[in-house]
Amino acid sequence: MKIFTAQRSAAVSAYGELRLIEQVRGWLGDVTPRAPFGIGDDCAVLPPARRAQLVTTDPVIYGWHFDDAIPARAVGAKLLKRNLSDIAAMGGRPVAAVISLALAANTRVAWLRDFYLGLADCARRFGVNIVGGDVAQAPAGFFGAFLTLHGEATNSRIVTRQGARAGDRIYVTGSLGGSRLGKHFQFTPRLAEGAWLAGRPEVRAMMDVSDGLAKDLTSLTTAGLVPALCGPAVPVSPAARTSAERSHRTALAHALSDGEDYELLVVVRGRADAKKFEQAWRKRFPRLRLTLIGTFAKQGKLPAGALRLADYHGYEHLR
Amino acid sequence: MKIFTAQRSAAVSAYGELRLIEQVRGWLGDVTPRAPFGIGDDCAVLPPARRAQLVTTDPVIYGWHFDDAIPARAVGAKLLKRNLSDIAAMGGRPVAAVISLALAANTRVAWLRDFYLGLADCARRFGVNIVGGDVAQAPAGFFGAFLTLHGEATNSRIVTRQGARAGDRIYVTGSLGGSRLGKHFQFTPRLAEGAWLAGRPEVRAMMDVSDGLAKDLTSLTTAGLVPALCGPAVPVSPAARTSAERSHRTALAHALSDGEDYELLVVVRGRADAKKFEQAWRKRFPRLRLTLIGTFAKQGKLPAGALRLADYHGYEHLR
């Protein structure tokens, strides 16, 4: 279904703001509580929070993050999943979200309904309440949905990107690459995995892979260190292999730089018992692999055979 | 200064995402804490909250909320002030904000700098931390900034829009109308006033005036009631009078329907001692008037002479 329509009766402009918000409330159903805990007052009200809180924000924008080939339900689900992945990356539990919509007056109501149904399904699955938002008009041809997600720590600590030391091991969940083949709409945010990892004393730092492993790893790399990746160890997804068959780049290049994998990148203390840690993972998550892909070395001491990551640019926005 | 530029070296695309985010961090200065409490990790971390929390989201979009005639600093300040007004309307105190930017690659860096400087000034003034955000590319000609603001209750209770009863009095702070003459960039969010009002036992319900008094009043009107406004009592702003001189509509019409006043609309219990309440207000806020503009009557019992609000449509989006 195309997102915009020339038929005025099928467009959001036929509703006007107030009736449209009533529709949104209906589409969201039980994932939006009654005001003031949900849509309908000046602010949404959230209960007091005993633990440290997490806040993240990510959008989906037509023509950039999706196009008419993607089902509206998948777009709605992805909007929430992108943000869930950030909560997972710090070991948190999601709680509530608000959505700011900017849309052209000729946005199709049926498309928007499917978008919200997909979002609501996903919110139900992960226990998130949609507590409020805003609808604003945008120029013709524009649709953007900007979600802010609130979560809270599941453990006494929050795992950040900071703290990697020389000798620490680098792990990644699942497999990487091939997002351009649509994989980036089908991923599962690693919430249970992130919460479990944050509770493990072996884990020093963590993040999710959104812009590609090669670029994202730099965010985990403490000054004076360099990531030493073992190329053959990097778990390459079937979609990355298919991408490689269709492009002039290798499957490994796709795995390192396609981005939008939404897997977890985990730094484990060098002195930790790696076998015990890996066994505990396999026992808890037998169906998702956790792969050792390298270590952090001191700068200037990159082991022979380690990947030169500068050769694999991750995704850079605004270029 | 125009927001978009044809000169590539002056545009955000000359920076790329990572360097641009570094710039943003510099522009924000001391209003953005270090990661993970500010920009730089997967999520921003907020401390535990003892009181009920408030969340609201409102954007500014080029061509819709502002144009090239408005200084970038005023746009940045307004983005935050719009959201602050929602926190004020429930009697809360602002805490922290995240901003999701969607911008064309040819957005002028100097414009964006001024936007963030205006935002930072306003954040400093009202004690808000800017703790995170996102930058995403949008089609040519588009700029939208979507802010989500977190606050907390200042009192044991939060004042909602619900609960008005027959005989309750309706008050409004300041004066209304004329927003199209630029008043909507110069307003002050009524945070101190909202917090004080939320602590008064006389106050039953509250909201801010964003879409125009005539439309917004319906949100305070309990089923079975009707607002009975006294036309001559409505405080008309000088800008509304100037607007009336330039249009075919009266100053009262501008006051009732221009919108973007960001004043507080307050419902006071009918049985409360109105004199005592008004005296306490004048003592606490001697420089801002609080005006009694009407009462809530039972439906079908609108007193003679009361305004027919249906004649004054407030602002409706997406029409």
Image: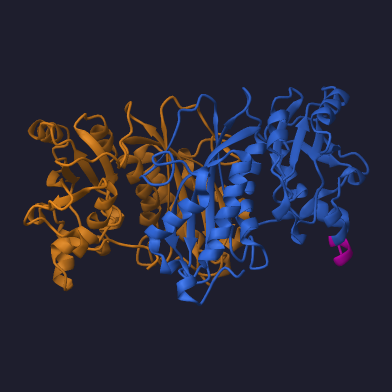
Chain colours: A orange, B blue
Q: Is residue A311 visible?
A: yes
Q: Residue at x 15, y 68 (%)?
A: A244
The foreground one among A5 and A55 is A55
Left or right side of A86 for A253: left
Q: Quadrant of residue A307?
A: bottom left
Instruction: Name the quarter where the N terminus of chain A is drawn.
Output: bottom left
Left or right side of A184 for B161: right
Q: Position of residue B235 (x, y in %)?
A: 86, 45
Q: Is residue B312 magenta?
A: no
Q: Residue at x 10, y 35 (%)?
A: A274
Q: Position of residue B303 (x, y in %)?
A: 90, 39
How many numbered tags mark residues here?
0
The foreground one among A254 and A26 is A254
Instruction: Name the quarter where the C terminus of chain A is drawn.
Output: bottom left
> Residue placed farthest to the bottom in the image?
B6
| Relative height, residue B44 to residue A181 (above, below) | above
Q: Position of residue A143 (x, y in %)?
A: 49, 62
Give the magenta range.
B243-249
| Relative height, residue A60 to residue B228 (above, below) | below
Q: Is residue B248 magenta?
A: yes
| Relative height, residue A311 to residue A113 (above, below) | below
Q: Position of residue B285 (x, y in %)?
A: 80, 33
Left or right side of B301 for A207: left
Q: Is residue A41 visible?
A: no
Q: Quadrant of residue A268?
A: top left
Left or right side of A311 for B111: right
